[in-house]
């Protein structure tokens, strides 16, 4: 009885306890998300409905989940960041109430919120997110909607690995109800292609509000890279370098990293997606760091390659300079109207010429052995953000420019080049007739990196007890 009364009191006071103090004040406003829904609706065909689901929760270990990450499209269009939700967007107003969007959310629950945190619920979604028509998720199954009357149902790929659950308002129930209501037995690729086309056309162009967050996430990532350049030494571990990035990201209010950090020394730097970061000593090798923060949903993507002892060898310097030169040539193409594919073509051309000059290859087509990836990708709510890669650059697109050269041991070239891996990656905002390098705060020239390495870092004086 006492436990029941406690829960009852907690439930009655939830409206007052829901608002959390000391939160950041620079989140995107509800007006931004409303504007994105209007832009989405404008691109929908006549007599259509779009259905957007939240991402599923993922198990980390046994009964522990990973920290939840919202579906970027759901967040972009609604501002909603919780699991077990579905958003409907209609091209035309519906019913006698003339609603053109409906959001279904998790129901407020005192017991659950004590364990897993606050929920917006119906009233929160209305006041915080600006929706007029909101229901609990359990009401979706009984919601009166005839999907058959629409000429087009627009939706993303439906996840197939959502755990079965009898709870009537979780994601499994929402997906099951949607497929039943819409008569979906298999994914309609026309519907998913249209969803991707619309969201890509919107997300590839950053709004002024998004640019504020992108500049911040990239800038604080540059601070982290610079601090490691000053702090690094041969005795530092990859994990320690990774930790400096993470600490600085958190210090500036970032929620974490936009992707798994890549911090690889020597041979590990030649592994494109090296995520272990567990070498106990960097030694006198190059350290490749591909690390970017995620700030309020928006990801940076910055890579710097530095010598652990503060000084490039002649071989390291030669490879580094080719990659730097490739970046410089690609930058010249960064302006509205340039075909996106031209960025990669130019990077390959410069790297091939540089490798031939050093005698590492003799045929330009063999450059792909040591430079196997593309030069650029869109950046934003996803580290590999949505966009049309077969189109031209447009003003307010943000793309990376990231050429690289990776020469693992036993490569068919002189041994002096083995285990040299270099990538330089910057986040570039496209302008009408030029570009802005958002990550310019972190040095790229090898001379500037060596100069920064001579400076002392705050982390050099940190002492911890031995264990």
Image (cartoon, grey):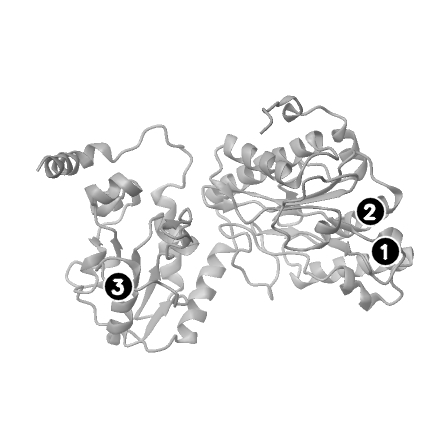
Where residue 61 appears, x then y in whole percent? Answer: 42, 51
Tell me if mark 2 has few (under 14), some (14-19) or many (20+) residues whose alpha carbon lies within 10 angstroms of its own: some
Q: Quadrant of residue 93?
A: bottom left
Q: Which residue sits furthest left?
A: 1
Q: Is residue 160 above or below residue 253?
A: below
Tell me if mark 3 has few (under 14), some (14-19) or many (20+) residues whose alpha carbon lies within 10 angstroms of its own: many
> Residue 173 bears which disc, if any?
3
Number of marks in picture: 3
C-alpha span from label 2 to label 3:
55 Å
Answer whether residue 219 is visible to the viewer in this image.
Answer: no
Q: Is residue 342 above or below residue 24?
A: below
Query: Is disc 2 in contact with disc 1, using a CB cutoff of under 8 Å?
Result: yes
Tell me what residue is drawn at x 76 percent, y 55 percent.
406
- On screen, residue 325 versus residue 75, left or right, reads right
Q: Secondary structure at mark 1?
A: helix
Tell me if mark 1 has few (under 14), some (14-19) or many (20+) residues whose alpha carbon lies within 10 angstroms of its own: many
Q: Can you tell which of label 3 and label 1 is closer to the viewer?
A: 3
Q: Nearer the viewer, residue 97 or 22?
A: 22
Q: Which residue is mark 1?
A: 354
> Residue 321 bears which disc, if any?
2
Q: Nearer the viewer, residue 268 or 194?
A: 268
Mark before the other along the chain sequence, 3 or 1: 3
Where residue 190 appears, x then y in whole percent? Answer: 42, 75
Mark before the other along the chain sequence, 2 or 3: 3
């Amino acid at each position: 009885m006492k436990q029941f009364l406690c829960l009852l009191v907690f439930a009655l006071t939830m409206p007052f306890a829901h608002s959390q103090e000391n939160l950041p004040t620079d989140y995107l406003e509800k007006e931004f998300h409303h504007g994105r829904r209007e832009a989405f609706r404008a691109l929908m065909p006549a007599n259509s409905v779009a259905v957007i689901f939240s991402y599923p929760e993922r198990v980390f270990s046994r009964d522990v989940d990973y920290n939840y990450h919202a579906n970027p499209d759901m967040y972009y269009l609604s501002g909603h960041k919780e699991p077990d939700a579905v958003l409907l967007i209609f091209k035309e107003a519906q019913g006698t109430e003339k609603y053109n969007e409906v959001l279904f959310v998790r129901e407020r629950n005192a017991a659950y919120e004590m364990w897993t945190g606050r929920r917006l619920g119906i009233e929160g979604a209305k006041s915080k997110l600006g929706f007029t028509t909101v229901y609990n998720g359990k009401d979706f199954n009984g919601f009166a909607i005839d999907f058959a009357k629409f000429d087009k149902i627009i939706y993303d790929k439906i996840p197939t690995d959502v755990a079965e659950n009898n709870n009537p308002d979780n994601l499994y129930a929402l997906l099951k109800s949607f497929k039943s209501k819409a008569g979906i037995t298999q994914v309609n690729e026309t519907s998913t292609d249209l969803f991707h086309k619309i969201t890509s056309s919107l997300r590839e162009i950053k709004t002024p509000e998004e640019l504020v967050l992108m500049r911040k996430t990239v800038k604080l990532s540059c601070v982290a890279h610079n601090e490691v350049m000053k702090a690094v030494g041969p005795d530092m571990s990859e994990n320690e370098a990774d930790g400096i990035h993470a600490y600085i990201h958190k210090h500036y209010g970032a929620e974490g990293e936009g992707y798994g950090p890549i911090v690889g020394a020597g041979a590990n730097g030649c592994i494109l997606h090296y995520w272990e970061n567990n070498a106990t000593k960097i030694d006198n090798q190059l350290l490749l760091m591909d690390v970017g923060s995620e700030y309020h949903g928006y990801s940076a993507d910055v890579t710097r390659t530095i010598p652990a002892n503060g000084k490039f060898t002649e071989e390291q310097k030669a490879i580094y300079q080719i990659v730097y030169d490739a970046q410089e040539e690609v930058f010249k193409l960064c302006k509205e109207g340039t075909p996106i594919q031209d960025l990669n073509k130019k990077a390959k051309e410069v790297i091939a010429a540089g490798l031939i000059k050093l005698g590492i290859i003799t045929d330009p087509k063999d450059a792909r052995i040591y430079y196997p990836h593309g030069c650029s990708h869109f950046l934003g709510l996803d580290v590999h953000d949505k966009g049309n890669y077969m189109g031209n650059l447009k003003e307010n697109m943000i793309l990376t420019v990231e050429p690289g050269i990776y020469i693992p041991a036993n490569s068919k070239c002189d041994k002096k080049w083995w285990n040299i891996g270099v990538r330089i990656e910057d986040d570039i905002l496209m302008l009408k007739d030029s570009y802005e390098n958002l990550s310019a705060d972190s040095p790229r020239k090898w001379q500037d990196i060596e100069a920064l390495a001579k400076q002392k870092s705050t982390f050099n004086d940190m002492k911890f007890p031995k264990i």
